Image (tube, grey):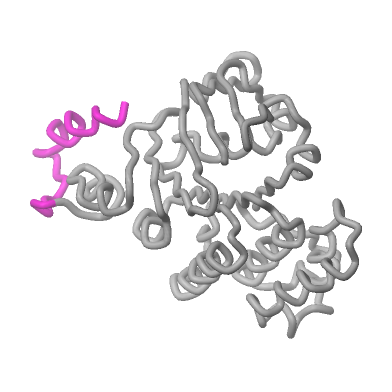
Amino acid sequence: MLELKNVEVIYDDVILVLKGLSLQVAEGKIVAVLGSNGAGKSTTLKAISGLLRSEEGEVTDGTITFRGEPIQRLAPEQVVRRGLFQVMEGRRVFEDLSVEENIEMGGYTRNDRAGLRRDRDLCYDYFPRLRERRKKLAGYLSGGEQQMLAISRALMARPKLMMLDEPSLGLAPLLVMEIFRIVRRINQEEKTTILLVEQNANLALSIADYGYIMESGRVVLDGEPEKLRANEDVKEFYLGGGAEGEKKGYKNLKFYKRRKRWLS
């Protein structure tokens, strides 16, 4: 459904962020992109959704295709109309609008009223808390409720592919697990393809069908979740442990840096 081939992104005509990035997202699947801060994960999503220009960024090489058509030169609203919707990091709800108004804003590209009503009720079915708070201003919701609202707003666009940028950021663990369960339900019940950018590798791999690990603007490892979980370096750098469970004291610092070269 979505393919990036050798994509390079430069900010301010100087800073090279993505360095020949290639990845694929199969239709109907959940694909996770993992990596530490600064790896280029969010930039990857912005390159797909057309939001780079607002930050002085540009795709300078490579191709991004959605269902066989190039989209790297399209404006964000054109990308949305083709069926891709990005849920931004940090929720980004309209704080001065009510919950219901926020949800309805997600369907601004549609004119099928019956379908919009159906999808609004669907959002409330997935997130009952939002139904209870539908007349409340979005700015007064908790962080978890705002994340639910941001996902609901995306659903209203009836996306063929939904991109989630760090949905667990700043949320309590139990709430994160609830949101991830619902994301999986949306994938299975609505057949929505999902590209998930996340630092919580354990949780992301628990719902993903395929995963990519990024470091320094490129993919360094990819495979099915079981393969990634079994990799000793992935265990050590991303899953909180390794076969030896060794502590990283000063004595082991050189060994640690040497092993981490596979990520560069």
As rendered, which of 38 and 107 lies closer to the eye?
107
Count the marks: 0
The residue nearer to you, when weighing 239 against 205, is 205
Residue range of the region highlighted in magenta in the rendering: 243-264
Q: Residue furthest bottom?
A: 132
**Quadrant of the drawing holding the C terminus:** top left
State which quadrant residue 120 falls in.
bottom right
- Prevailing secondary structure class for the magenta stretch in the rendered image: helix
- The residue at the point 64 percent across, 14 percent down is 13
The residue that appears at 58% across and 23% down in the rendered structure is: 63
Q: Is residue 234 above or below residue 133?
A: above
Query: What residue sits 74% from the left and 85% below the top?
Result: 132
Q: In front: 30, or 91? A: 30
Q: Locate residue 123, reporting x and y percent.
A: 70, 72
Work out whether 71 lies above or below 31.
above
Residue drawn at (37%, 40%), measured in percent from left and top? 213
Q: Is residue 38 left or right of residue 131?
A: left
Does the magenta-highlighted stretch encompass residue 255? yes
Residue 49 drawn at (x, y percent): 67, 38
112 is within the stretch colored magenta? no
Q: Where is residue 53, by image quadrant? A: top right
- Quadrant containing the N terminus is top right
Q: Position of residue 130 (x, y in %)?
A: 71, 77
Residue 132 drawn above or below residue 264: below
Q: Does residue 67 appear to the left or right of 82 in the view shown?
A: left
Quick check: 228 left or right of 158?
Answer: left
